[in-house]
Amino acid sequence: MMLNPQSDQPQLVGSILRKPGTHLSFEFFPPKDLENLSKIYDVAAELKSLNPDFCSVTWGAGGSTIKNSLEVVKHLTHGMGILTVAHFTGLGITRDLADEFMERFIGSGINNLLVLRGDRPHAARETAFQGGAAAPTGALPRDSFKYAGDLLAYIRSKPHCGPDELSLLVAGCPEGHPEAESIEKDWDHLANKVRQGADGIVTQLFFDNGAFYRFKDGLKKRRVEVPISVGVMLVTRAKMIQKIIELSKCKVPAELNAAIERFVSDDASMEAFGIDYAARQVAELHDQGVRHFHFYTLNQSGPTAAVLKQLKGRLGERPTPAPRTVLIEYREYMAYPDSKLTDLFKKYGLDPNRPHDIVHNHALRRYEITQ
């Protein structure tokens, strides 16, 4: 069990993104089965070595994976020392349930949220935290939130949810939301979400940088000045990305489309091309002044690490992380034989190959590992 005490002053993503320099962040999704948590923690540990500014964790439609999401967010935040943003979708969530979720978030020391409308549930969803009867397919409570802006405004209206206590990010679609009346209307809605209290924007995926430049100009005309993190999707599997493109309705440049068709049955070549394409895309954006990059990792560390390795020197040096101390109960530490201590280190975001100090606190029956 992690015993790391909470800080009186919360770390807020909005404040971090306003600092000069290049910022990196990674997105993970929770496993459906809690038995597979170790896999996502291994990936997070590997990417933690790149010293991201934060990471984010998704949840399913209607809050269907909130239990697993909260478990991952809590461990990444307190167990591994990674500043973590929890996704919070409004569609299908009532105000009472939103209050319950907020109590869980804040009570767990989670002070950063990515507020989204979310997708309509395609199958029966669980009643999160309560174990009650699930709603039938597609059914939504009458008093549930219909738009992300409504949920964001509701959160900001609650006590202790001001910008100095809670950081709220929202999503933006450079090519417009697929359900939007028009791209201009979609950007109007995004600007309104910022006015309602958003501290920053994370974009949906796009493969044509021109779409982002138009998006940025559109927000500038609407006097939106909050930081914008560019969502970067790596094309590593042709069949997988075809489904994502179909859902997002994003445009695919001819070069990328030709590669997807060519490597539809050649995963290794598709991944190599996708890494190179993403690296070129990020490099061009950086040359044009973009400083915030949010990688959709799909719970894989290799491709994202390869892109950043290819860009080493282009994005500036990452700051050296401050030393941190992990407190591990004696019983948990002793449950790992010497041959498995590497797994314990990875669980808490430590590198067993880097210098570290281990102190056994006999009085409190715990190990204190500093790195």
Image: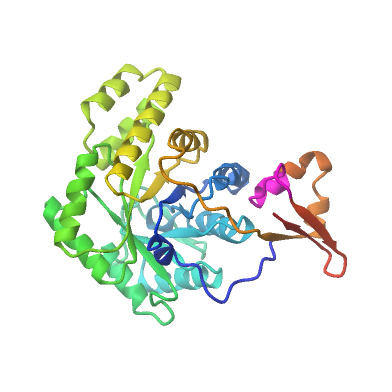
Q: Position of residue 186 (x, y in %)?
A: 17, 56
Magenta stretch: includes residue 112:
no
Q: Quadrant of residue 256?
A: top left
Q: Position of residue 29 (x, y in %)?
A: 47, 47
Decide which of 75, 275 is in the foreground and name it.
275
Decide which of 11, 33 is in the foreground and name it.
11
For the point 38% across and 53% down, the residue is: 61
Image side of residue 237 versus residue 355, left or right? left
For the point 18% across and 65% down, the residue is: 223
Quadrant including the N terminus: bottom right
Q: Quadrant of residue 352?
A: top right
Quadrant including the C terminus: bottom right
Decide which of 223, 124 is in the foreground and name it.
223
Q: Position of residue 340 (x, y in %)?
A: 77, 41
For the point 31% across and 17% down, the residue is: 262
Decide which of 246, 349 is in the foreground and name it.
349
For the point 20% across and 43% down, the residue is: 211
Prevailing secondary structure of the magenta residues: loop
Would you place residue 367 above or below residue 364 in this image?
Answer: above
Is residue 146 at all visible to an observer of this figure?
no
Would you place residue 233 above or below residue 318 in this image?
Answer: above
- Protein image colouring: rainbow
Image side of residue 334 versus residue 23, left or right? right
Residue range highlighted in magenta:
343-355
Is residue 73 at all visible to an observer of this figure?
yes
Image side of residue 69 versus residue 364, left or right? left
Q: Quadrant of residue 17?
A: bottom left
Q: Position of residue 183 (x, y in %)?
A: 14, 51
Outermost residue toward the right in this view? 362
